[in-house]
Image (spheres, rainbow, N blue to C red):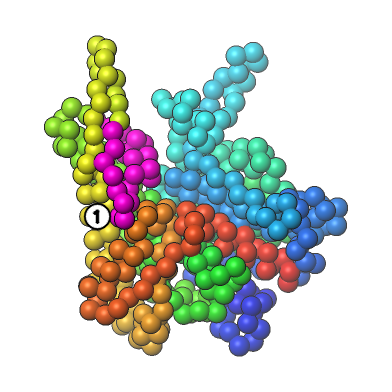
Amino acid sequence: MSVDDAETDDESEPAPDEEEAATTEEPAEESTGAETDNGGDTEASGDPVPVGVKLGSTRTVIAMPGDGDDLETVRTLTCLATYEDAITGQEQVIFGEEAAEQYPDRVQFTLRSGLPEDEKGADLTRRFFQSVIEANDVPENSGVVYAIPTIENERGLANLQSVVEDSGIGEHFIQSYPESLCGAIPAFGDGLEAINEIFLAVNMGSTNLEASAYRRGEQLAPFTTGAVTGNEVDRRIANYVEAETQGRVNVDTQTAREYKEQHADFQNFEPFTDVIQQPGGGAHEFTIERSVMDAVDEYLDEVVEEFANTFLPELANDHMKVYQLALDQPIVLTGGMACIPGIVDEFAERASEALNRDVEAIAPDEPDLAATIGAQRIAARLTEN
């Protein structure tokens, strides 16, 4: 039984097929996992723990049941570094923020392109993911749904699948669903209401801009471009900081990303100051007034351009009725760039101007966590079936 069937019985259309959603074989029916407590009572009863996963190019997020009705989330940078144990001489692995801070000279971000492109990348991602699972006691006795990017890269998707399947979790089942669908689920309510809707989703990620239409869980006219990305915003901020300070300050893309995450705001941006150490001693304090917002403002213009003039015409050409119905509903913005305060309303305003019609946009409360939370809800529904 698909997620759609579980939500709407036989009135709904089928969930994304194998090619579009890249799902694995559907699980056999299991007893309900509703009374899970981070794997506690569930381990004893044999019921699977529903786990949601998103292995992202910048951050990886895992969601699973916590205490009571709470959801426990694990959020970490998708990176690792290795070092030699000073006593035993054995190689040790450190991951996430600690790896980036303590070993900046050799930290490796394992999914910079969004997917593990080759076996070496898959091995690195496998070591990273296994370390995260072990450090956070993610239960083997689980049913796992993981979010995947909308991208035509069979090898990369197969490598990502192997990373999850080789991790030791997901004893009961492992399935994948489009990231933009998973990310849209929390925007519609506390359940799986999105599976019943016809809507448009724009996923504003680090490595790709994605847009799709969804008809009761079925993905239509998926569009992806690597030309408009959060990573490109970081590079622009670094360049603009150098220009704004007349060449006196050079920041790396990691620092630029931190500026973006901490200061970008379409509603109430305020100039901010930072300090760098000067060669030969002394500190230099500088103020950023334009660099961050110039970069994100250009990014949003490009997002609207791709959405209005590339994605929508393709959707209208292939699925006119869905195009008409979906534009009457709020457009869902997901992904890390959707976390910028004010970007949802600003997108709606610029899209309305580009399309010469009123457009409404919404986003989940935590866009950077939404894909994992949505995946976990799907996993919970599948465990009930």
Residue under the point 59% across and 46% down:
74
Magenta highlight range? 250-273
Amino acid type, label 1: Asp
Q: Nearer the viewer, residue 71 or 167?
A: 71
In the image, taking residue 286 as reference, residue 52 lies left or right, namely right
Q: Nearer the viewer, residue 322 or 23?
A: 322
- Number of numbered discs on residues: 1
Q: Is residue 133 above or below residue 33?
A: above
Magenta-span inclusion, residue 346: no
Residue 235, picture quadrant: top left
- In the rendered image, residue 312, in percent from the top left (x then y), is placed at 31, 75
SS for callout 1: helix
Q: Quadrant of the C terminus?
A: bottom right
In the image, taking residue 207 as reference, residue 37 lies left or right, namely right
Residue 282, picture quadrant: top left
Q: Nearer the viewer, residue 376 or 266?
A: 266
- In the rendered image, residue 359, in percent from the top left (x then y), is placed at 32, 75
- In the rendered image, residue 13, in percent from the top left (x then y), is placed at 56, 83
- In the rendered image, residue 138, in percent from the top left (x then y), is placed at 68, 46
Residue under the point 43% across and 57% down:
335
Residue under the point 45% across and 38% down:
109
Q: Quadrant of the N terminus?
A: bottom right
Residue under the point 65% across and 37% down:
135
From where the camera sits, is residue 16 visible? no
Per the image, the residue denoted by label 1 is 297
In the image, taking residue 113 as reference, residue 87 lies left or right, namely right
In the image, taking residue 121 as reference, residue 86 lies left or right, namely right
Magenta-span inclusion, residue 262: yes
